[in-house]
Amino acid sequence: MIKTYIIGSGNLSLNLKKKIKFSQIYSTKNFLKKISVINKNKSKINIIINSFFSSRKIHEINTYSDFVIRTVFNISKILDSLKPKIINKIIYTSSSSVYGSINSQFLNVEDNNREVYAAFKISAECLIKNFCKKNKIPIIICRVFNLYGNKDDFSILQAIKKVKKTSKKIKIFNKGLSVRDYIHVEDVVKIYSYILKNIHNSNYFDIGTGKGLTLFEIIKKLNLKDKNIIFEKKKIREIKYSVARNHNILKKIPNLKLKSVEEFLDISEKLQYKKNLGQNYIDYS
């Protein structure tokens, strides 16, 4: 059995560790400390890189050098330190945010750091892809859409669930009309497990359900009280439609059953999903 090293803490890493046999989780710092021992492995290893600047802190980029260190610099250190000959394959956890990183509105003021975050995600993809191509290592880049479930303490769905149970307040931007694809962490783990065992060539995959929802629709079906929902008047620039083009991965895992938002939020009535429109783009209106 091939040993798998999961780099980066967090909800996805913890759930992968539970599912994948012979796997270990390391922070980037601890992985680099152990690299000399890891490089002595006589058998091949898998690497899953989940390490990156936390998306929950993208509004708090106060030190650019720290941001760079915790994104592409740390990844470059990992690549520089690993012996290519011991690597069986690498999975890199990217983000659906990359689809909004390149646009024609270059001179617009971008004040919420989303484009910076997305651009560095693409840079990380390119670094790892370059390393793998040079060393003939399969690289699978997984652009994960909106993750939720289990010990999640960050997703908007988890926040809405708390509002439903505790009557806390929640802020919603752009009237909650942006369409998002929400995928349960356990489904992502199933997909990663399949990739580790069965996919041997380099590829990109959108990791999502292929169906999108608006927060407005979810809030309406939950009958949340008006006093608990704060619709922010200030608009933020964001992708209007962000739904996974997941047909490639579903072709490879045809019997994959994905968990529903209705089940997670205990909604009895069917939600109105929107399918991928063939593109993901930023709404500048």
Image (spheres, grey):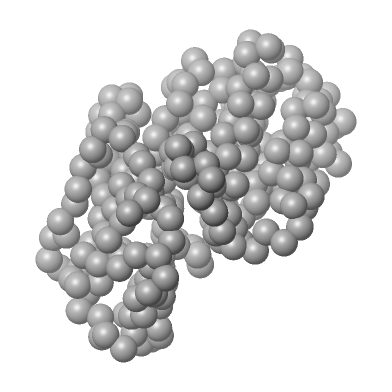
Residue 172 drawn above or below residue 7: below
**Residue placed most toward the observer, 267 or 194:** 267
Which residue is pictured at 19% across the width and 52% down the height? Answer: 273
Q: Residue 281: x and y, percent?
A: 36, 41
| The N terminus - image quarter | top right
Residue 157 can be seen, yes or no:
yes
Left or right placement of residue 82 versus residue 162 in this view: right
Residue 46 can be seen, yes or no:
no
Image-quadrant location for residue 96: top left
Q: How many marks overall?
A: 0
Which residue is pictured at 54% across the width and 54% down the height? Answer: 109
Residue 80 drawn above or below residue 193: above
| The C terminus - image quarter | bottom left
Left or right placement of residue 78 versus residue 219 in this view: right
Left or right placement of residue 266 versus residue 99 in this view: left
Image-quadrant location for residue 112: bottom right
Which residue is pictured at 26% across the width and 33% down the height? Answer: 278
Image-quadrant location for residue 148: bottom left
**Residue placed most toward the observer, 171 or 165:** 171
Which residue is pictured at 30% across the width and 68% down the height? Answer: 175
Q: Residue 79: x and y, percent?
A: 75, 28
Q: Residue 103: x and y, percent?
A: 46, 38
Q: Residue 246: x and y, percent?
A: 32, 33
Residue 78 drawn above or below residue 117: above
Q: Residue furthest front?
A: 107
